[in-house]
Image: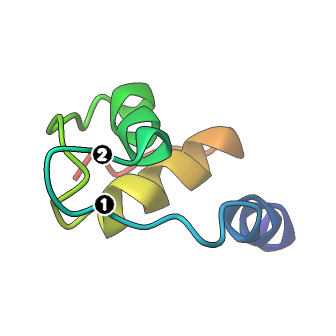
Amino acid sequence: MLGETLKIALGELGQKEIRGAQHNERILEYQQMTGLDFGTDEVAWCSIFANWVVQQANLEMSNS
């Protein structure tokens, strides 16, 4: 499983916040798909991303 989750995470390499009124749509997708939705990419989204990765690998999310 570790290899699969790492492959999923590495596939998203390069995602980052956009300052100002625009937002990175991919980060917003991570939020929407996990239910950890804050509506902006300017939040600490590392846990959201980790939850998204395990969700993609069909593992249990921490939801925090």
Relative placement, left or right, of 25 versus 47 is: right
Residue positioned 59% across, 53% down in the render:
53
Residue positioned 52% across, 64% down in the render:
15
Q: Amino acid at mark 2?
A: His
Q: Which residue is mark 1?
A: 18
Residue positioned 85% across, 72% down in the render:
3
> Could you say where residue 4 lies in the image, as x and y percent from the top left?
83, 61
Q: Nearer the viewer, residue 26 or 53?
A: 26
Q: How many marks?
A: 2
> Could you say where residue 42 lies in the image, as x and y percent from the top left?
17, 59
- Mark 2 neighbour density, 10 Å: few (under 14) some (14–19) many (20 or more): some
Locate the N terminus and report the quarter of the image it occupies: bottom right
Rounded to the nearest whole Å, what is the CA distance between mark 2 and mark 1? 5 Å
Instruction: Label 2, secondary structure: give it.
Output: loop
Which mark is drawn over residue 10? none
> Could you say where residue 30 lies in the image, as x and y percent from the top left?
44, 41
CB contact under 8 Å: marks 2 and 1: yes
Instruction: Label 1, secondary structure: give it.
Output: loop
Q: Earlier in the sequence, mark 2 or mark 1?
A: 1
Residue positioned 17% across, 34% down in the render:
39
Q: Is residue 51 above or below residue 31?
A: below
Relative placement, left or right, of 9 versus 15 is: right
Q: Is residue 17 above or below residue 36?
A: below
> Could you say where residue 63 lies in the image, as x and y percent from the top left?
28, 45
- Mark 1 neighbour density, 10 Å: few (under 14) some (14–19) many (20 or more): few
Relative placement, left or right, of 33 versus 2 is: left
Q: Which residue is mark 2?
A: 23
* Figure coloring: rainbow
Q: Amino acid at mark 1?
A: Ile
Q: Quadrant of residue 35?
A: top left
Q: Is residue 37 above or below residue 4?
A: above
